[in-house]
Amino acid sequence: MGKNKLTAPDDLDFSILTHLQKDGRVSFTVIADKLKVSIGTIRTRFNRLIEEGTINIVGRVDPDKVGFRSYAHIAIYIRPATLKEQVAKRIAQMPEVSFLAMTSGAYDLEVNVMCRDNDHLVAFINEISAFEGVSQTNTTMYLKVYKYAQPDLMLLKQ
């Protein structure tokens, strides 16, 4: 099955994904036992989900515990608007970026960044401010993060 042909996730896929969200290192044996299916079924489903790009397995770190002291939301205004995609592609390549989206609100792009400290954040803002098309930025610092999580897949079942 190639990346071009996607299979809509079914209930078993969602159950597998839910187990992996709780513990990305959980064994296929444990998942199979809990879901009362064969290990081969879990392995096949897992490999398909990986191949299709539905999931990727990564080690998720707590930014504060590893030394990221400046976590911020930046609203970016683009003029002319025809440069949105070009600017977004450049920003998406920057390692500080943890989230980037085009918005329909007052500004054009929303970006969340994790920086070592405030000097690093200022350097980042200065760099993107120099991009062609960036007319203004508005930065909001996150002083304390209370929750940083993946979406609860069970919300799709309601």
Image (cartoon, rainbow, N blue to C red):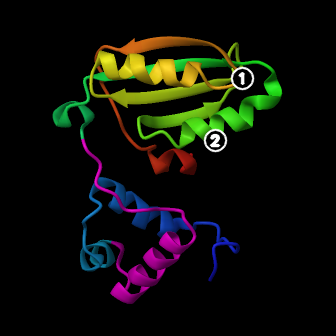
What residue range appears in magenta?
35-61
User: SS class of the residue under badge 1?
Assistant: loop
- Against 34, is 60 above or below? above
Residue 50 numbered mark, or none: none
Q: Residue at x 76, y 30 (%)?
A: 83
The answer to which of 72 and 85 lies nearer the viewer is 85
N-terminal label among 1 and 2:
2
Q: Name the residue beneath numbered marker 2.
A: 89
Instruction: Identify the mark at residue 133; answer none if there is no mark.
Output: 1
The amino acid beneath tag 1 is: Gly
**Residue 79 in the image: above or below residue 88:** above
Callouts 1 and 2 close, C-beta under 8 Å: no
Relative depth, front residue between 90 and 57: 90
Left or right: residue 148 compared with residue 50: left
Residue 150 horizontal/vertical position (percent): 41, 44
Q: Position of residue 88 (x, y in %)?
A: 64, 35
Q: Nearer the viewer, mark 1 or mark 2?
A: 1
